[in-house]
Amino acid sequence: MKFGRRQFIGTTVGAAAALSAPAVLGQARPRVVVIGGGAGGATAARYVAKDSKGAIDVTLIEPTRRYYTCFFSNLYIGGFHEMAALGHGYGKLASDYGVNVLHDYAIGVDRGAKTVALAGGGSVPYDRLILSPGIDFKEGSVPGWDLTSQNAMPHAYKGGTQAELLKAQVEAMPEGGVFCMVAPPNPYRCPPGPYERVSMVAHVLKARNPTAKILIVDPKPKFSKQALFEEGWQDHYAGMVDRIGPDFGGDVVEVRPDSMEVVIDGTVEKVDVCNVIPAMKAGHIAALAGVTDEAGWAPVVPASMQSRMDENIHVLGDAAQQGDMPKSGFAANSQAKVCAMAVRAALTGSKVFPAKFSNTCWSLIETDDGVKVGATYKPTEEKIAKVDGFISQTGEAAGLRKRTYEESIGWYAGITADMFG
Amino acid sequence: MRSLAAAMAFTLAVAAGAAAETVGDAERGVDVFRKCSACHQVGKSAINRVGPHLNGVFGRTAGTVERFKYSKHMQRASADGLVWTYETLDAFLENPKSMVSATRMNFQGLKKAQDRADVLAYLRRFSDNPRDIPESEPTLRLDDPNLDPAVLTLEGDPDYGEYLSSECTTCHQADGSNQGIPPITNWPHENFVVAMHAYKQQLRPHPVMRMVAGRLSDEEIAALAAYFGGLE
C-alpha cells in the first residue's frame, strides 16, 4: 500500500487527537452509547461499529424490538404499503456489526459521571453519547388535546400503532363526513408530511367515500411543496380539500375530543375524524440530559453534531437544532454519518474528511404522482448551511412523476439497508 | 423570480455560444453518417430499423419515437427528462454509455469533435426550426462538455471514496442490487467518472444526481469511482 500525502496527514491528525484524549487511551475499548434506534441512531450505531472494525464498543438503547418507520407511514394510510413492510428489527446490528442492542428506555443522563440510566434499573457508561430521540409533543400547544386524547384524535406522527388507528378511522368515516387535520407550527418533523397525508387520505376517500371533505386547520401562512400539493389536489381531488390558514383563524384553534368538535377562531365545526399534529420539541431525553434550549431543541456544532452544551454528547436528526436542514429521516441519516466520523476520530484518531450533508424528501400525491425536494448542505461556524437545491416543478409529465415515485421506493430500500444493515 | 433567472441564464448562454464556435460541415457529415446508417435512417422515407429514425431529433425528448422499443435505460433517461440538444447529442455521440448507461446503441462513439460537429450539422437538416441558420438553436454550440484527459486518469483514494460513499448509500444499495434506484458498484473506472461529470456538467438529466455530483471535485469523483469500482 502506498503511503500517500493524505494518509500521512490522516496519521498526524490522528496522533494529535489521540494525545488530547488520554483518558480514553487508558481503557481497553472506548465506549459509544446511542439513544434512539431510528434514522439517526441506528445509522450512527452501524457506522461507528462498522468503520471502527471492533475498536469501539457500541451500545444502542432503543425500547422497541421492532421499529416502524414514520417515513412511508402516509403511504400505509393511503393503502400503498403494508404496515409489516415498514417494520425493521435490530438483529443484524447485533450479529453482523457487534452492536450491543439494549431494549430499554433511557431515563436520565449523568453528564459528570458519563452514564445513562435505564428504566429497567441499570446504567451504562459512555465516552461519547449520541442522542437521536426524535420528537415529543409540546404540552398545551393545541388547547383541549393531550396524550390522553390520542385515541379520539390521533397524531399518527410517530409511526406504527397511531398510523394504524388513523387509517382505521378514515376507512370507517360516515358517508360525506369530515376529516380534519390540525397542522403543526414550524419547526416540525417532515415538513411535507402533513400535506402528503392529506393527499393519501383524499386518495382513500375518493374511492370509498367521494362526498367526504378534508379540512386543514393550519397555523402557517405557507408550507413545503405548497404549489405542487395544491396543483395535485386540484387535479385529483377537486373540491375535496379546504385549508384554513392563519388569515382566517387557522392559528387560533381548540379541540374537544369528547364531542369531536374543532373550534376555529370561535366557530365550532363538528368533524368525524380529527388528526391533531401538535407543536413539537426534541425527544424528552434530550431535555433530561440538559442539552436543549428554551425552544425545546438541542443546538449543535455543525461540523460534528456535538451538543453546544456538552462536547461528549452528539445530537442527531429531528431533535437537533442545526440550521437549514429539514427534520427528516434522510437528514438524520446524513447527519449520523458525519457524526460517526467525528466520534471515531475523537476516540480512535481515525481520519477526518470534510463534512457533507444532503437531504431529499419524496411525497406521493396520488397513484404514480410523486414529487420531491432536496438540497445539499455544508457546515459553517454558525449553522448547517444550504449550498444548492431543487424541487419538482408543477405541470411535470406523468412519466417523470411515476419515475419519481418509483425512485422513492428505491430510496426506502436504500436508507433502511443503510440503517439496519 | 425563478423563471426570470432561468430566462436570463438562457440569454447569457446563447450570447456566449454565438460568440464561440460555429457548427460543423454538413457535407462532410454525410460521410460520417455512414457509420450510423447500418442502424439509423434519416430523411423523407426514413423508418425505424435497428435504431429509431433520426428525423426531428433536435429538441425531442429521448426515447419517444413512436413504435420503437427502447432499452429500459433509455426509457429511464426519457422519464428523467433527457432532451436531445446539441450538447446532449454531442456527449452521447462521443460516448453513448456516458449518457445512458446500458443503451442498446452498441457504438464505440465518435472520438473526434470535428466528426461529431459534422454529423450533427448534417442531422440538423432533418430537424425543424430554424433549420437554415447554422449558429442558432438547435445546433448552436455552448460550452464544450469534454473532459480534460487528466481527469480520467486521476487516481482516486478509495478510503476517501468510502467516506464519500455514505452519501450515495442513502439511496443506492451497497450490495449492488437494484430496488428502484440503479446500482453503482463495479463500474469500469472511466465510465463512472464520465457519468458523474455528465451529471456535474448538467448533461445527464436527474436533479438529485446533478445536485450531488455538482459539488464533488475531480478528486472526489475519482475517489468514489475507485471505491465503488472495487466493491464485490
Image (cartoon, coloured by chain):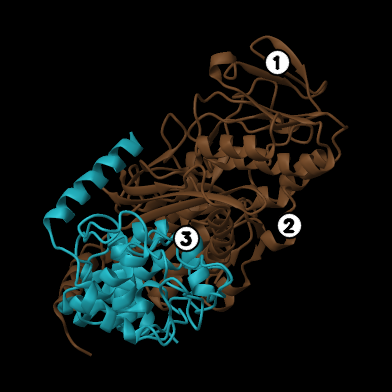
Chain colours: A brown, B cyan
Residue B59, compared with residue A270, is above or below; it is below
Callout 2, which amino acid?
A: Met
Subunit that carries the residue with mark 3: B
Front position in the image: A7 or A121: A7
Q: Residue at x 16, y 72 (%)?
A: A9
Which residue in the protein does label 3 denote? Answer: B80
**Element type at mark 3:** helix
The residue mark sitting in front, 1 or 3, is: 3
Please identify the quarter of the rendering in which residue A215 is found: top right
Q: Residue at x 30, y 58 (%)?
A: B131
Residue B51 image offset from top left, x and y in percent = 47, 79
Front position in the image: A54 or A421: A421
Residue furthest to the left in view is B19
Asked whether the residues under the numbered discs 1 and 3 touch, taking CB atoms below 8 Å apart as contact, a structural biologist would say: no
For marks 1 and 3, give the CA distance: 45 Å
Subunit that carries the residue with mark 2: A
For marks 2 and 1, give the CA distance: 33 Å
**Element type at mark 1:** strand
Labelled disc at residue A263: 1
Residue B137 image offset from top left, x and y in percent = 28, 55
Labelled disc at residue A83: 2
Residue A209, compared with residue B17, is above or below; it is above
The residue mark sitting in front, 2 or 3, is: 3
Subunit that carries the residue with mark 1: A
Badge 2 and badge 1 both on one subunit: yes
Residue A16 image offset from top left, x and y in percent = 18, 67
